[in-house]
Image (cartoon, grey):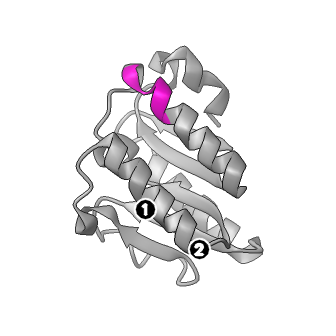
Amino acid sequence: MIKIIAGNKGSGKTKRLIDMTNETAKVAAGSVVFLDKDNSYMYEVDRAVRFVNVNDYHVASAEMFLGFLGGMLASNYDITTIFVDAFLKLVKIDMADAGWFFESLEAYGKKHDVTFVLSVSADPENLPAFCKDYVI
């Protein structure tokens, strides 16, 4: 399953994502992961959550990001939810061209029973049609 928290810069997406992460960590039956572009929110995320600075792993494209996620899921079968802050900065993809990416993400979610929650810096009204059902 994929969920998108969309909004323009300064609309509170990251705060909402961190709150959802911490609430999920309290009730999750498995592991919760928070992916970000730097360490600035590390201490706001519950310590039970695996915080990962993706830039530490030199992920430079959408394909590399999918491989990175695949490696995480292959090495830890207990992951139930992955939260991704600054999605567009991490994945380096234009949402209009991201249909294939979301198909792959959906396949990962189904195969591994994982929910992905993405923070996307964009007006929800301007997201491509394939994203509309994911917006929460």
Say which label, 2 or 1, has the lower sequence index.
1
Residue in the picture at 27% in, 44% down: 61
Q: Residue furthest bottom?
A: 47
Find the magenta span and give its range: 97-101
The disc placed on residue 35 is 1
Report the side of 4 relative to 109 (left or right).
left
Mark 2 neighbour class, 10 Å CA radius: few under 14, some 14 to 19, many 20 or more: few
Report the side of 123 relative to 117 (left or right).
left
Report the side of 105 relative to 119 (left or right).
right
Residue type of the residue flagged with mark 2: Asn
What is the count of numbered marks?
2
Residue in the picture at 71% in, 47% down: 110
Mark 1 neighbour class, 10 Å CA radius: few under 14, some 14 to 19, many 20 or more: many
Secondary structure at numbered mark 1: strand
Position of residue 44 measured from the top left corner of the image (x, y, whole percent): 45, 74
Asked if residue 3 shows in the view, the reply is: no
Quarter occupied by the C terminus: top right
Residue type of the residue flagged with mark 1: Leu
> Viewer-nearest of labels 2 and 1?
2
Position of residue 107 measured from the top left corner of the image (x, y, whole percent): 63, 41
Residue in the picture at 53% in, 57% down: 83
The disc placed on residue 90 is none
Secondary structure at numbered mark 2: loop
Position of residue 95 measured from the top left corner of the image (x, y, whole percent): 40, 26
Main secondary structure of the magenta stretch: helix
Task: Give the residue at mark 2.
Answer: 76
Asked if residue 1 shows in the view, the reply is: yes
| Res. 9 image quadrant | top left
